[in-house]
Image (spheres, grey):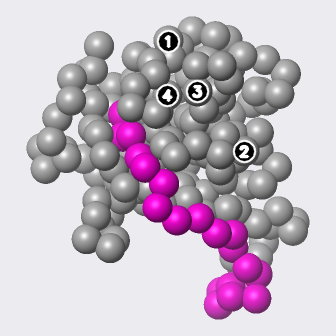
Amino acid sequence: MQKEISIKDLQLNPFKLIGEEWMLIAAGDEQKHNMMTASWGGLGVLWEKNVATVYIRPTRYTVGFVEKQEYFSLNFFGKNKAPHKIGGSRSGRDIDKANAANLTPVFDSGAVYYQEAELVLVCRKLYHSAFDNKNFVDAQTENFYDNDYHKIFIGEIVKVLKQ
């Protein structure tokens, strides 16, 4: 079970945490929720708030949950990649991904997160938009897309939970 800690007590490398160990982005409510594996994102300070930025393709089922809800969570499992196998390979349109990944959803303060996560960042949405290919400066960046430009979500980190 996680314990709430101060964000100032976090000691982590966001490049390793997000880029190598990955995360599950989760949103929804007790009636319906979903999650997805992600390895693109960022942590920092914006508008005098501690924030997380995530990028979700519009074709992903999870994007609708993040758009609809006020909160989303970022769930980190360390080197345990097992939750990401389901989170990144199956659609929540077809299965209950949390159940398939043997994860226990916890509903708290308008957010859903997973009891088994080593670290959870609960985020309150502040901003969203979509990439516009007219704004790409590096032409090679366009190679990541086939007209399915990521939506960008910035959330204030309102709660940090750690095992």
Q: Is residue 60 above or below residue 24?
A: below
Residue 79 locus on image (x, y percent): 41, 28
Residue 23 locus on image (x, y percent): 49, 38
Q: Earlier in the sequence, mark 3 or mark 4?
A: 3
Q: Check disc 1 and report the residue beneath it.
A: 104
In this rendered view, identify the residue nearer to me: 137 or 91. Answer: 91
The answer to whether residue 131 is magenta is yes
Three-letter amino acid code at the position of disc 2: Gly
- Give the number of the mark in front: 4 or 1: 4
Q: CA distance from mark 1 to mark 3?
A: 13 Å
Q: Check disc 4 and report the residue beneath it.
A: 112
Classify residue 12 as left or right of residue 104. Answer: left
Please report the bounds of the magenta region as a residue range.
120-140
In this rendered view, identify the residue nearer to me: 97 or 146. Answer: 97
The N terminus, quarter of image: top left
Three-letter amino acid code at the position of disc 1: Thr
Q: CA distance from mark 2 to mark 3?
A: 12 Å
Q: CA distance from mark 3 to mark 4?
A: 7 Å
- Give the number of the mark in front: 3 or 4: 3
Dot label at residue 29: 3
Q: CA distance from mark 4 to mark 1?
A: 10 Å
Q: Earlier in the sequence, mark 2 or mark 1?
A: 2
The answer to whether residue 43 is magenta is no
- Check disc 1: other Cα within 10 Å, few if <14, some if 14-19, many if 20+: some
The C terminus, quarter of image: top left
Q: Is residue 148 above or below residue 8?
A: below
Three-letter amino acid code at the position of disc 4: Val
Dot label at residue 64: 2
Q: Is residue 110 above or below residue 42?
A: above
Please tell me whether mark 4 sits on a helix, a strand or a loop: strand
